[in-house]
Amino acid sequence: MSGWWPYLEERTRGEVDANVLRDRRLRAVKAVLEALRPLGVGLFEAEQVVHARYEALGDRVRRTPPDALDVSSLAARAEALPGRVAAVEAVWDGDTVHDWFVVLVAVLDGPSREGHLATVYHRSGAAAPGTVAAGAGQALADHLGVPFHFASPEAPDDEAPRRRTLQSGP
């Protein structure tokens, strides 16, 4: 357990636990950070407090299910976006909670427009997120009859060239 937990007021502890139980990690971290910032606690320590609460509450946490990656689910999300899908793209991103993950986006007609389709996190016992995202993204692109772009499926690279950057050129 994090050593900062006892410094939180009972009301804040309840707020943090309520957010953890609903798998709202960022809201829980924000509550801890706001409450303990006057004591010099930074983001890293706040994340540690919340991580410790996830461990303490264990199976009681209602985990958010992963985004569905089947073609029909992805196509339905793409269809709901405001504009015509011109391409499907996968891009790496990361944070201190999930490490590296891949975001599938629909590149829409119009200047620099895109819509979120799914986020692919690393899952224990599953293929690497890049492999999973590449398969789902290519299947959706084939279904929609549009190009698919993933600059770095084998290794995380959040600075890999994006599709629009490659099209516009120097």
Image (cartoon, rainbow, N blue to C red):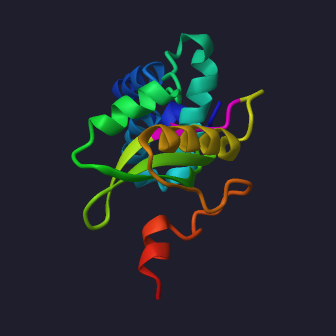
Nearest the viewer among 62 and 158 is: 158
- Left or right of 119, for residue 35: left
Q: Is residue 111 above or below residue 83?
A: below
Q: Residue furthest bottom?
A: 170
Q: Nearer the viewer, residue 58 or 13?
A: 58
Q: From the top left corner, tell me how far across and down residue 16 is, in percent.
A: 42, 28
**Residue 98 in sight from this viewpoint:** no
- Which residue: 36% across, 26% down? 15
Q: Position of residue 95 (x, y in %)?
A: 56, 51
**107 or 93: nearer the viewer:** 107
Residue 160: x and y in percent read 59, 68
Q: Position of residue 81 (x, y in %)?
A: 27, 42
**Residue under the point 35% across and 29% down:** 76
Res 149 → quadrant: bottom right
Instruction: Reply yes or no: does residue 147 show up in magenta.
Output: no
Image height check: is 66 above or below 94?
above
Quadrant housing the N terminus: top right
Up the image or down, 33 lies above or below 132; here it is: below
Magenta region, residue range: 118-123
